[in-house]
Image (tube, rainbow, N blue to C red):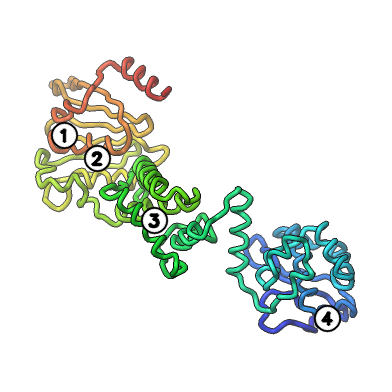
Amino acid sequence: MRDIVFTRSGSGWIPTVIREDGELRLMLAAGADANHDPRTFTFPIGEAHLAVIRDDLARHLLLWSAVLPLCDAAGTRGQLDEDAAVALLDPVLLSPPADVDALFRRIRWDRSRLVAHGADIELLGRGQVCTAMRTATEGSDEKRAQEYHAHRRRAERGVVLGPLDAEILRYTGRYLHGATVPRRSPDAVDPALLPQVMRVIATAEQACAGMRIDLDPRRGNRATDKRDWDRMAATVDAAVRRAHPELVDDAVRTVSFLMCSEAADRSRSTPADDDEEAADVGASAGKAALSFTDDKGGEKTWVRDGSRTASAEFWEFVADRSAGDNEVFTIEDEELGEGIQLHFYADSIARITTVRHGAAGSDPQYQVEYRLVDGIGEYRSLVTAFVRGGCAALEQHGPWMSDVAEFERARRRRDAR
């Protein structure tokens, strides 16, 4: 049988005193089990401890802070070390303030809980935990704790933010969590510094105006071209650093990340037929029908009917089918007996032309020529050229090598660089 003896109203997670089978115990929720549900721990306390917990919020919070690391040590399935928890009761709850301060210099404790409940951060840093808790409150401010942690993480990396740096990070929503996808949040910025923040953003926008980050269908339907991303990031970084040399790296990087992520989102929301290849109305005029295949037996036929370009449908086919074990894709014009084969694993392409059609049971003869490819942008150009004009249109995109050994040597030289 379990009865609640003392709890702080509206206090959320602050430990509660219960009576279980006639024994006083402190109950607290901490950590999570294997199913990510909160774990609950209890350990015995005495009447004297209950009296302090009931009357002294600061000591109650300090005990919580000291016990939380023991709960973390229990993991998802382990038991709380009750002896270690009980051993903290008298030193934290009943000792003079100087002794409590000394104890907290020796043990592990959870700063974030104290910060969330109003502790003086500067005094905590100096080891004066009892004095720091004079400003403690029952209610918690989790954002304050998150900001404290973010500041400590940056300090560990040697990063000190100036006022403008901090507001730029707040503008992109990455002040608290560096892994957050950036967004524009002007309302989160100090109004006095918002004009300066917007000048930095304007510098970045001007630097990357006209640049784009295309999708990379070799890695799925939403993956972007890493080269495009790196190129835009470098351009924005250079412009922002040149115009605003006082900014720290964290602020500069969050601005370039914002520009790149927005450019990538624009590409993801643009229909494939709206790309540069489709801007030419006659882009697919040279071919009436094409077949697409991959290395896993996938096949798709495109017929010119005005609805979509062959290039758009081919790259959609690649995005849907490409995988680590499926990196060879072919476009074939069966009527003309020519095609191209893209080898994503080797960053290369082959153009295949029928020299003589098979007759009377004989096999046809093909001419196969190879070329190294530099990134998805060049793959797109080669596919577009073939769709428009067949293998003949690829001549200007050489050099092409018919000798396999020569091609392999060229590929090894390229890879070695």
Q: CA distance from mark 1 to mark 3?
A: 55 Å
Task: Give above or below for 232 relative to 195.
Answer: above
* Label 1 – label 2 distance at C-alpha: 11 Å
Name the residue: 34% across, 43% down: 228
Label 4 is placed on what type of residue? Arg
Residue marked by disc 2: 292
Asked if labels 3 and 2 touch by Cβ distance under 8 angstroms, the answer is no
Q: Nearer the viewer, residue 385 or 114?
A: 114
How many other residues sit within 10 Å of disc 4, few (<14), some (14-19) or many (≥20)? some
Give the foreground label among 3 and 4.
Answer: 3
* Numbered label attached to residue 19: 4
- Total numbered circles: 4
In-image side of 180 versus 201 (left or right): right
Report whether 28 appears left or right of 260. Answer: right
Q: Answer with mark 3 or mark 4, whichever residue precedes in sequence.
A: 4
Label 3 Cα neighbours within 10 Å, binned few <14 / some 14-19 / many ≥20: many
Question: What's the CA distance linking mark 4 and mark 1?
Answer: 83 Å
For label 2, the SS is: strand
Q: CA distance from mark 2 to mark 4?
A: 72 Å
Find disc 3 in the rendering and name its residue: 200
Labels 4 and 1: the sequence-earlier one: 4
| Label 2 or label 3, whichever comes before in sequence order | 3
| Residue type at the position of mark 1 | Glu
